[in-house]
Amino acid sequence: MSVHAMTVKQIISRVRQVFPNVSETYVMNLINDAQVEAGMYNSKVVHAKISTAADQMWYDLKDAAKDSSNNVLEVNKVFRVYFMDNDGDYILIPRLLDKDLLLTDVSSESVLQSPDSR
């Protein structure tokens, strides 16, 4: 079973196989502490290339997405995005931190919802 597919119930069940009398609250606190500690470290950095399409604003970066070499992406944070221009130069796209921006479609004046709000 993949680590990405484990539920809290499955983790608690595994812990209780070794420690049968441990409380669920205690195990959940341990899981939370482990997540905080694991989040303090960069465990894996990957560079990927994805082909772009004209007039497309959103690109799939979930675990099932694949890069241009057909490798499965496992993205939990994007640090930088570059686009290659017609001259073959890579241009850094500024990182947008304001989630309240109104985004418009390339071909219309209509306002789109961000992918987070779908």
Image (tube, helix red, strand yellow):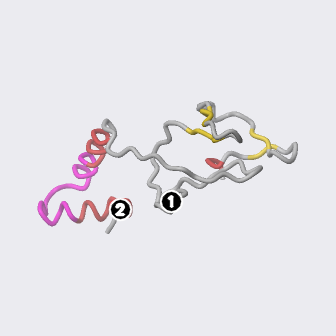
Say if the magenta span includes residue 19.
yes
| Quadrant position of the N terminus in the picture | bottom left
Packing grade of label 1 (10 A; few <14, some 14-19, many >=20) is few
- Indicate whether 13 appears above or below 83: below
Residue 77: give x, y in percent of width and height: 47, 42
The secondary structure that dominates the magenta segment is helix
Q: Residues within 10 Å of mark 2 (few under 14, many from 20)?
A: few
The local secondary structure at tag 2 comes to: loop
Amino acid type shown at disc 1: Ser
Between 75 and 31, the one lying in front of the other is 75
Q: How far from the left and from the top, in percent, is residue 65?
A: 53, 59
Residue 96 occupies which quadrant of the picture? top right
Residue 24: % across, % down:
25, 55
As helix, strand or loop, the secondary structure at mark 1 comes to loop
Tell me the residue that label 1 is attached to.
Answer: 69
Q: CA distance from mark 2 to mark 1?
A: 31 Å
Q: Earlier in the sequence, mark 2 or mark 1?
A: 2
Taking the view exactly as shown, the residue that stands out farthest to the front is 87
Image position of 79 with respect to 52: above or below:
above
Q: Which residues are magenta?
A: 14-30
Q: Residue at x 71, y 47 (%)?
A: 57
Q: Which residue is mark 2?
A: 7
| Residue at left offset 13%, top offset 60% | 21
Q: Decide whether residue 67 is among the magenta residues.
A: no
> Residue visible at 54% across and 53% down?
61
